[in-house]
Amino acid sequence: MQDECPHNEKDRYMPCPATCAFTRCQRPWHKDAVTLEDLTDPTVDRMATIKEQCRHCLHFIKNGPRASAR
């Protein structure tokens, strides 16, 4: 996905900032999480996202990688 970004320089943005005009998710399964329980789920590895917007995506929260116990 980052390879397709028209302005991304290697290792400059990680993850792609939510303020970027090109970060809008076009996938049909994207849905913004709205409950506090989903948004603060401590088991989600939010550092694994490619885009900041994914950190608030219900699909990523429910299906994404889990954070390892620290």
Image (cartoon, grey):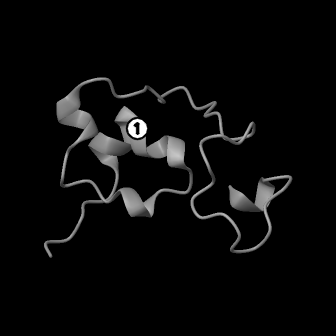
Query: In the shown orientation, is residue 24 left or right of residue 69?
Result: right
Q: Please state the horizontal and vertical placement of residue 21, each as a whole percent of the image.
A: 75, 36
Task: Provide the residue designation for mark 1.
Answer: 56
Query: In the shown orientation, is residue 64 left or right of residue 8?
Result: left
Q: Quadrant of residue 60?
A: top left
Q: Please state the horizontal and vertical placement of residue 25, each as a whole percent of the image.
A: 61, 34
Determine the residue positioned at 47% across, 29% down. Answer: 29
Give the quadrant of the N terminus.
Answer: bottom right
Q: Secondary structure at mark 1?
A: helix
As rendered, which of 66 and 37 lies closer to the eye? Answer: 37
Q: Quadrant of residue 34?
A: top left
Q: Is residue 5 above or below residue 32?
A: below
Label 1 environment density (alpha carbons within 10 Å; few <14, some 14–19, many ≥20)? some
Give the quadrant of the C terminus.
Answer: bottom left
Query: In the shown orientation, is residue 10 left or right of residue 35?
Result: right
Query: In the shown orientation, is residue 48 left or right of residue 67?
Result: right
